[in-house]
C-alpha cells in the first residue's frame, strides 16, 4: 500500500510534511474520517515516523486531523454546525482587523489587496483548479489580517485558513462563476480605499456571511445525502 508521496530531503522536514498532508486532505486524497497511517507516509517520503507524527500534531492544531488515543490520527469530519462556528470566528477576527487596517492608512496594504483581486480574476480563468482559486481567496483575507498591524489577528487567521479551504473543497464549489469570487471582494476594497470604517465592516460582513450561507447549506445537503 502506498500513500502516493515522493521522498523528501531533510530541510524544514516537519513543515514540508505538514504542507503535503494538508494539501492531500484539502484536495480529498485523504478523505474525512480516514486514518493517517504514519508508517505508510513515512515510508513513501523516505523519513522516520517521528517527523510525520510531529506534522500530524501541527495539522491537529489547525483543525484538519484529530487524535484518538491508542488508534492514531484521523482526518477530521467537520459538521455544518462547526462550519457556522468557524465563519463566526472569522467575522470577529476580520472585522477587528479591517478596523485597524483603515486606521493605519497604509497605501501599500491597499495596493496589495488590489493586486490580490487582480490575481483572483486571473486564476478564475481556464487552466486553474478550484484549490488555486480558493487559496487566492484566502490570501486576500490573510493580507487583510496582516495589514491590521496586529500579529495576533494574523496568527489566529492562519490557524483557521486551512480548515476553511478544506470545507469549501469538500463542498466542491463556492460560486458557479469563479470570477464571482473576485467580484465579492471589490466592495470591501472600495470601502477601505474610502477610509469608511463602518461601510468596510458592513461589506466584509456581507461578503463572509454570503460565503457562510453557500458553504454551510451545501455542506448540510451533503450530510443529508450521506446519511440516507
Image (tube, rainbow, N blue to C red):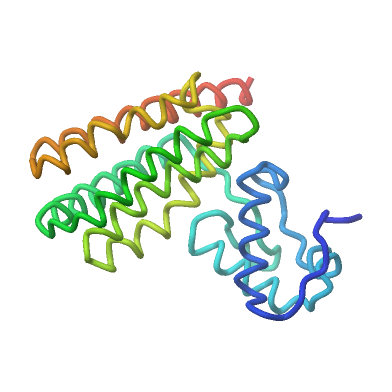
User: In this rendering, is residue 35 above or below 200?
Assistant: below
| Left or right for 20, reference 218 | right
- Residue under the point 18% across and 53% down: 96
- Residue under the point 58% across and 40% down: 131
User: In this rendering, is residue 197 above or below 186?
Assistant: below
User: In this rendering, is residue 92 above or below 55?
Assistant: above
Q: Find residue 119 and report its image quarter.
A: top left
Percent from the top left, x then y, of residue 179?
45, 26
| Left or right for 81, reference 25 | left
Percent from the top left, x then y, of residue 53?
67, 72
Q: Quadrant of the C terminus?
A: top right
| Left or right for 157, reference 126 | left
- Residue under the point 62% across and 35% down: 129
> How many discs mark residues in the rendered view?
0
Q: Quadrant of the N terminus?
A: bottom right
| Left or right for 52, reference 223 | right
Of the pair 51 and 181, the residue shown nearer to us: 181
Amino acid at each position: 500500500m502506498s500513500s502516493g508521496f515522493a521522498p523528501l530531503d531533510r530541510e524544514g522536514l516537519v513543515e514540508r510534511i505538514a504542507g503535503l498532508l494538508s494539501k492531500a486532505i484539502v484536495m480529498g486524497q485523504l478523505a474525512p474520517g480516514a486514518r493517517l497511517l504514519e508508517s505508510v507516509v513515512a515510508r513513501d517520503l523516505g523519513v522516520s515516523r517521528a517527523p510525520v507524527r510531529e506534522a500530524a500534531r501541527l495539522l491537529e492544531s489547525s483543525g484538519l486531523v484529530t487524535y484518538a488515543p491508542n488508534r492514531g490520527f484521523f482526518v477530521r469530519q467537520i459538521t455544518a454546525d462547526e462550519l457556522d462556528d468557524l465563519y463566526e470566528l472569522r467575522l470577529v477576527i476580520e472585522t477587528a482587523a479591517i478596523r485597524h487596517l483603515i486606521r493605519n492608512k497604509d497605501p501599500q496594504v491597499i495596493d496589495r489587496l488590489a493586486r490580490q483581486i487582480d490575481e483572483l480574476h486571473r486564476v478564475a480563468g481556464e487552466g486553474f483548479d478550484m484549490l488555486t482559486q480558493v487559496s487566492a481567496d484566502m490570501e486576500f483575507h490573510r493580507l487583510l489580517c496582516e495589514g491590521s498591524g496586529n500579529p495576533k489577528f494574523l496568527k489566529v487567521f492562519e490557524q483557521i485558513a486551512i480548515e476553511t479551504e478544506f470545507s469549501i473543497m469538500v463542498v466542491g464549489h463556492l460560486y458557479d462563476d469563479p470570477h464571482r469570487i473576485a467580484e465579492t471582494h471589490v466592495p470591501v476594497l472600495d470601502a477601505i480605499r474610502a477610509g469608511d470604517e463602518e461601510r468596510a465592516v458592513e461589506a466584509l460582513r456581507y461578503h463572509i456571511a454570503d460565503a457562510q450561507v453557500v458553504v454551510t447549506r451545501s455542506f448540510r445537503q451533503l450530510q443529508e445525502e450521506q446519511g440516507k
